[in-house]
Image: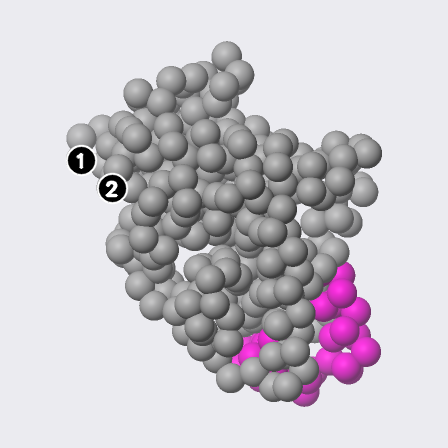
Amino acid sequence: MANRPKVTIVGAGATGATCAEVLARRDYAEIVLVDIKEGLPQGKALDINQMGPILGFEATVTGTNDYAETAGSDVVVITAGLPRQPGMSRDDLVQTNEKIVKSVTEQVVGASPDSIVIVLSNPLDAMCHVAKSASNFPKERVFGQAGILDTARYRTFIAWETGASVKDVQALVLGGHGDQMVPLISATTVGGVPLRKLVSEDRIQEMVQRTAVGGGEIVKLLGTSAWYAPGAACAQMVDSVLLDEKRVLPCTAYLEGEYGIDGLYMGVPVKLGRAGIEEIYVVDLDDDEQAALAKSADAVRDVVGVLGG
């Protein structure tokens, strides 16, 4: 289709394919699904395109094993990398995925030097550093998806707890993607009503804890990582950039002094538009939240410290 913006999704696993499917349904972009496994991206692209006549969108998804077909992409979503295997330490995972994400970033940026890069590969905060370094892009054009997913989980639990529509639950989760994430309870509302007016502190803390281990809960049930919500979260970020929606969303951004954190990727609220991260918002934190964010930053620094540099 002429004049559609182009999105490349690296990694045609469940998350990458879900992102492609959600974007295809939105029907405004040309989508390229790239993977090293022969047949996988081609087959998934064909299957998604064949949904088009049923759901009413144009078939504009291409599957390929070759980065040449990704040339001229406006946005690149990186989902490539291995999930953690049994017996594999977190440090092993960091070093394995560092090699994959570095290689992928170099190839995709070589073909699309003006693109914006959205990282989903884990461990997320560290892989953002790898992509920024490998691409040599400015910080506003390399960022990660984590907070939208964490916030979506938190909002789901709140909607169930209050019996309210999930559409009316507003929440914000900051910090690293993992057990150290920091949900801002003071900024959480249901239809504008503060959460603390509706739910007891004990129940709030249970929901916060369930959110923090939300990924692990799904791994225990499925034996593998989640993909529907993470894929949709990436697609939401692509929408905000390519449609210049200027959504204010929690994303993993490179901080240079904001929140007292310097030289580190952390989850914070940002404005996402055609230029990428157009603004980083600094919200007031209470002492507990500030301490929790500092602790989260320390945990992220530990993981980043394992990188080969």
Numbered tag placed on residue 283 in the rendering: none
Above or below, comparing residue 197 to residue 237 in the picture: below
Q: Examine the structure image and report whether residue 198 is included in the region drawn in magenta.
A: yes
The residue located at (43%, 17%) in the rendering is 65
Q: Within 10 Å of the Cα at label 1, are there few (<14), some (14-19), or many (20+) other Cα atoms?
A: few
Residue type highlighted by circle 1: Asn
Q: What's the magenta bit mostly, secondary-structure-wise?
A: helix
What secondary structure is found at the residue carrying circle 1?
A: loop
Q: Nearer the viewer, residue 207 or 121?
A: 121
- In what quadrant of the picture does the N terminus appear? top left
2 vs 1, front mark:
2
Residue that label 1 marks = 3
Tell me the quarter of the picture where residue 81 sits: top right
Residue 120 position in % (x across, y down)? 52, 44
Q: Within 10 Å of the Cα at label 2, are there few (<14), some (14-19), or many (20+) other Cα atoms?
A: some
Above or below, comparing residue 124 to residue 283 in the picture: above
Mark positioned earlier in the residue sequence (2 or 1): 1
Relative side of 184 to 133, left or right: right
Above or below, comparing residue 303 to residue 194 in the picture: above
The residue located at (51%, 44%) in the rendering is 309
The residue located at (53%, 16%) in the rendering is 37
Tell me the quarter of the picture where residue 9 sits: top left
Residue type highlighted by circle 2: Asp
Residue 111 position in % (x across, y down)? 29, 29
- What colour scheme does the image use? one colour
Residue 240 position in % (x across, y down)? 35, 55
Residue that label 2 marks = 114
Q: Examine the structure image and report whether residue 204 is included in the region drawn in magenta.
A: yes
Q: From which residue to which does the magenta span run?
A: 183-212
